[in-house]
């Protein structure tokens, strides 16, 4: 199969065209994932654009995004495939008399009675797809094993049907908020990408591209204040998405340049704990 | 190239990173897809394939710097005035040495006086001029570090020498002064703070440049392998509490937060799962509708076991203070996983400090107050476990009940006082569990004045808790 990208720079430009500003690391790993045909495990603090990365890659390559949201108790009938019992039951009842047992047996385990779940759907798709397995750290360790076959071989084994192999290798993203250590087996199969809070310059760029009608000066101020706040020892540091919310708030309020008073009044958009707000206000001498 | 890479990977393994064979192969494949002259891309290719845990990234970066610092055009050792080969570099270094702290010599920056150099540096920092900062870092190292080939001192010595001569601490104030003048008038407090952060950030960058430069020169002198060995640092989870430097302690604190999140999720999960409870009739009937009223899928109620109650009794005398503080922090960060947490600290007297944690949400503030306010000294301020336990038993002993787990923290170095081990024995009979955590290596136990064995026989277990990894394993077991 032809690679999707020619160079790291192309990934970067492409992502920029869909309003996702990648740094060298992000673009480089995405490029490698395509070349090596390996999934990417994206880790990092909440709200730094992990999920958005997968969406943006899908948009950039014009692929369909298939998303599997993980949660505790996720099992193969929700992740891989399930037999449509009700339909099978109807099928058996519909011609009780005519068919012999073996006919019915073969018949009810056909494609018609198979309910595709996201993982199977991703590998059987004819068109290009991006598969996003979101918050993979939420499933139990045992359930992780479900993913292993599809991640390394891009195939799914169904006892009744045999092995279904991917028609094309999808780009696969797994995101994790790191609430538990993922198993070695899973990590080994993936490329690892840690997405951290962006550098100040990049954050400013992000604010500029994502928030309409913002002035360069305001974006600069926002990026600088956010950086200063992140250096404090807080319960929850402001994420990029919160910084964007804050920028939008300020634009809506018609503010071109923040002074201490305005910063204090809108700080609750950026920080979600009362103690954090008090601390930040005090530290930035805007109390 | 393959030799270099396998050396690199061996070094990563030596540094404690788990690099498997498949990952090694992946790395080899990965670098064949990227242009080798792009150093950043090269680094990320190796990083993405070899490092699967963000906490290990720093160690990876250090080893990477050591192994690949001499490659890449912008990293040539000499600054722009000639070829970058080692002989030339050594000669230059000797030149610089002969010049001593004075100045003179030939070529570009070498002719500047220290004052002029400082001015240029200030300008570069003011404007955030990266290229200039890098060149200056090089010049500063060449001029002030006094590096000699083969001299058996560590990189920190050179770093100290260089930075001492540059007076970067004063630099921040000078920069602030200059920017005030630039604006013409006073800055508002908010602006001032932001400016200061910006300059501190740049100065930090400059320091890193200096450090990198010193490292590059050392690698050129001693070779990558020897250098990597001296730079080898334990991973955050392997740092020993009792010997952690201030920097390491900071890193540990940073590691604590994600760890507590992880542990909390794990503990909650553990409580919910495992045993099955009685049949949940309502739920079963609800689900039977899908099968035409046949209860094909029985549903069970999850048991809700009571959260354990925790009593932490910690020795906070000098030798084990860091460990006690750290454990208290961890326990309190997890306090919502326990129905109640009570904390006691002692040296030779004992005091309850639960209140300190209740009043504030900020654990480090509470720890601060423990250090200054808790009444833990009875006679001389040397650990006396026996007396502390005795008083504990008298005052609070009746509050221990079958729901409470008691954790005792300390090295049990009792300064040859009476052990009063009977307290622990009594405790064990009343409490759910009694554990002892000892931050000393197991081989030191029961040597000298350590009597951990004497106490240990009465507990449900004595655990060696030297680093974060062991502490984590223990807490997980607890709930």
Image (cartoon, coloured by chain):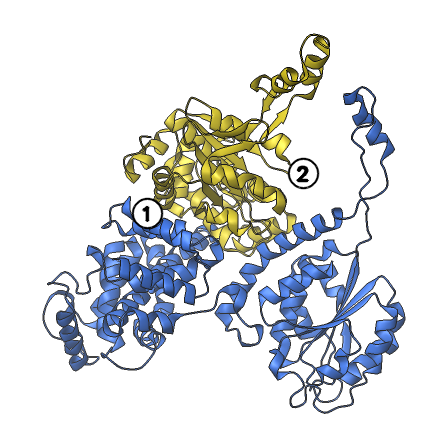
Chain colours: A yellow, B blue
Q: Which mark is residue B29?
A: 1
Residue denoted by label 2: A73
**What SS does tag 2 mark?**
loop
Instruction: Residue A113 in the image: state x and y as whole percent.
Output: 61, 19
**In this picture, residue B203 sits left or right of residue B148:** right
Q: Chain of mark 1?
A: B
Q: Which mark is residue B141?
A: none
Q: Nearer the viewer, residue A117 or A279?
A: A117
Image point (71%, 9%), residue name? A94
Image point (85%, 37%), residue name? B279
**In this picture, residue B281 sits left or right of residue B310:** right
**In this picture, residue B307 sits left or right of residue B321:** right
Report if residue A177 is visible in the image: yes
Q: Nearer the viewer, residue B15 or B72?
A: B15
- Vertical placement of B430 versus B199: above or below? below
Image point (66%, 40%), residue name? A72
**What SS does tag 1 mark?**
helix
């Amino acid at each position: 199969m032809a690679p999707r990208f020619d160079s790291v720079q192309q990934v970067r430009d492409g992502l920029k065209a869909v309003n996702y500003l990648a740094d060298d690391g992000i673009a480089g790993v995405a490029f490698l994932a395509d070349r090596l045909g390996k999934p990417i495990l994206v880790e990092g603090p909440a709200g730094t654009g992990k999920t958005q990365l997968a969406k943006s890659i899908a948009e950039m390559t014009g692929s369909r995004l298939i998303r599997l949201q993980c949660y505790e108790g996720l099992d193969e009938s929700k992740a891989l495939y399930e037999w449509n019992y009700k339909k099978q039951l109807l099928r058996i009842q519909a011609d009780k008399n005519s068919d012999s047992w073996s006919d019915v047996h073969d018949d009810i385990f056909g494609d018609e009675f198979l309910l595709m779940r996201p993982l199977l759907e991703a590998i059987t798709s004819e068109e290009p797809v991006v598969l996003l397995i979101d918050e993979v750290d939420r499933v139990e360790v045992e359930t992780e094993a479900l993913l292993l076959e599809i991640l390394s071989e891009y195939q799914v084994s169904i006892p009744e049907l045999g092995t279904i192999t991917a028609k094309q290798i999808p780009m696969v993203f797994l995101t994790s908020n790191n609430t538990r250590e993922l198993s070695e087996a899973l990590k080994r199969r993936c490329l690892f990408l840690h997405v951290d809070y962006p550098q100040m310059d990049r954050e400013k760029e992000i604010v500029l591209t994502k928030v309409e009608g913002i002035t360069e000066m305001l974006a600069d101020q926002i990026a600088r204040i956010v950086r200063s706040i992140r250096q404090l020892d807080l319960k929850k540091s402001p994420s990029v998405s919160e910084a964007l919310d804050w920028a939008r708030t300020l634009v809506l309020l018609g503010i071109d340049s923040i002074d201490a008073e305005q910063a204090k009044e809108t700080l609750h958009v950026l920080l979600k704990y009362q103690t954090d707000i008090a601390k930040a206000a005090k530290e930035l001498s805007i109390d | 190239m393959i030799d270099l890479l396998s050396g690199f990977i061996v070094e990563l393994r030596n540094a404690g990173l788990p690099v498997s064979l498949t990952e090694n192969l992946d790395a080899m494949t990965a670098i064949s897809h990227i242009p080798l002259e792009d150093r950043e891309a090269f680094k990320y290719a190796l990083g993405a394939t070899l490092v699967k845990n963000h906490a290990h990234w720093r160690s990876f970066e250090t080893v990477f710097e050591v192994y690949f610092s001499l490659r890449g055009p912008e990293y040539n050792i000499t600054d722009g005035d000639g070829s970058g080969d080692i002989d030339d570099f050594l000669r230059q270094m000797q030149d610089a040495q002969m010049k001593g702290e004075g100045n003179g010599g030939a070529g570009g920056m070498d002719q500047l006086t220290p004052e002029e150099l400082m001015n240029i540096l200030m300008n570069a920092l003011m404007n955030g001029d990266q290229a200039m900062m890098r060149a200056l870092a090089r010049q500063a190292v060449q001029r002030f570090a006094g590096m000699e080939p083969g001299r058996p001192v560590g990189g920190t010595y050179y770093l100290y020498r260089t930075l001492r001569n540059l007076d970067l601490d004063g630099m921040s104030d000078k920069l602030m002064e200059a920017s005030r003048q630039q604006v013409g008038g006073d800055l508002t407090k908010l602006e001032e703070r932001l400016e200061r952060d910006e300059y501190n950030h740049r100065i930090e960058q400059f320091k890193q440049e200096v450090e990198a430069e010193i490292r590059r020169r050392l690698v050129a002198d001693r070779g990558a392998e020897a250098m990597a060995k001296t730079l080898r640092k334990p991973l955050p989870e392997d740092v020993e509490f009792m010997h952690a430097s201030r920097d390491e302690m900071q890193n540990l604190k940073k590691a604590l937060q994600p760890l507590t999140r992880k542990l909390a999720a794990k503990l909650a999960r553990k409580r919910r799962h495992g045993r099955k409870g009685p049949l949940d009739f309502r739920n079963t009937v609800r689900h039977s509708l899908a099968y035409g009223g046949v209860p094909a899928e029985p549903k069970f109620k999850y048991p809700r076991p009571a959260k354990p109650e925790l009593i932490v009794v910690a020795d906070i005398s000098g030798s084990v203070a860091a460990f006690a503080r750290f454990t208290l922090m961890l326990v309190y960060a997890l306090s919502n996983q326990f129905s109640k947490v009570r904390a006691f600290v002692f040296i030779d007297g004992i005091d309850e400090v639960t209140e300190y944690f209740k009043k504030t949400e900020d654990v480090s503030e509470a720890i601060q107050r423990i250090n200054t306010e808790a009444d833990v000294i009875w006679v001389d301020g040397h650990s006396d476990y026996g007396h502390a336990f005795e008083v504990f038993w008298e005052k609070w002993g009746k509050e221990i009940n079958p729901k409470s787990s008691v954790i005792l923290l300390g090295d049990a170095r009792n300064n040859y006082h009476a052990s009063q081990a009977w307290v622990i024995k009594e405790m064990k009979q009343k409490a759910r569990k009694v554990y002892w955590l000892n931050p000393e290596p197991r081989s030191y136990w029961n040597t000298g004045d350590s009597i951990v064995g004497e106490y240990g026989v009465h507990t449900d277990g004595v655990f060696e808790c030297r680093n974060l990894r062991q502490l984590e394993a223990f807490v997980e077991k607890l709930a």
